[in-house]
Image (spheres, helix red, strand yellow):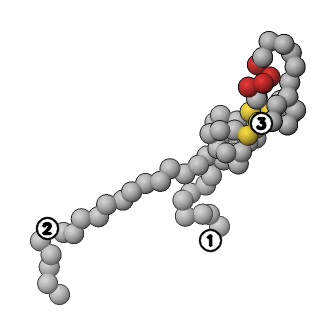
Amino acid sequence: MDKPMAGPMTRCPSCNGTGRVNCMCSRWSDGDVGCRSCAGSGRSACSSCGGSGTGRPLPVQVSVRPPSNPRPY
């Protein structure tokens, strides 16, 4: 069991696997950086991966229909 059943986790394309992105406060024109989201670092958790750095697997619903002509055993 080397690999998880869902397949290998890939890097998040939004943060390139770091789990952090530039915080909105770093885009303000006053040059000051720091807010509660980034705790003054200028980088906040990626909203695409939740800060994990890996892509989130999408839930998939698999439907299975019984055969139209079942064979007796």
User: How far across and how far down the image is residue 67, in percent?
Assistant: 18, 69
Q: CA distance from mark 1 to mark 2?
A: 36 Å
Residue furthest to the front in view is 36
Displayed quadrant of residue 64: bottom left
State the mark number for residue 24: none
SS at circle 3: loop
- Name the amino acid, label 3: Ser
Q: Earlier in the sequence, mark 1 or mark 2?
A: 1
Neighbour class for label 2 at 10 Å: few (<14), some, many (≥20)? Answer: few
Q: Quarter of the image for the N terminus: give it.
A: bottom right
What residue is disc 1 on? 1
Residues packed near mark 1 inside 10 Å, few (<14), some (14 to 19) or many (20 plus) = few
Q: Amino acid at mark 1?
A: Met
Residue at left 60%, top 63%? Answer: 4
Badge 3 is on which residue?
Answer: 37
In this rendering, the answer to whether 26 lies above or below 29 is below
Mark 2 sits on what residue? Answer: 68
Does residue 16 appear in the picture of this structure? Answer: no
As helix, strand or loop, the secondary structure at mark 2 comes to loop
* Label whose residue precedes the other's in the sequence (1 or 3): 1
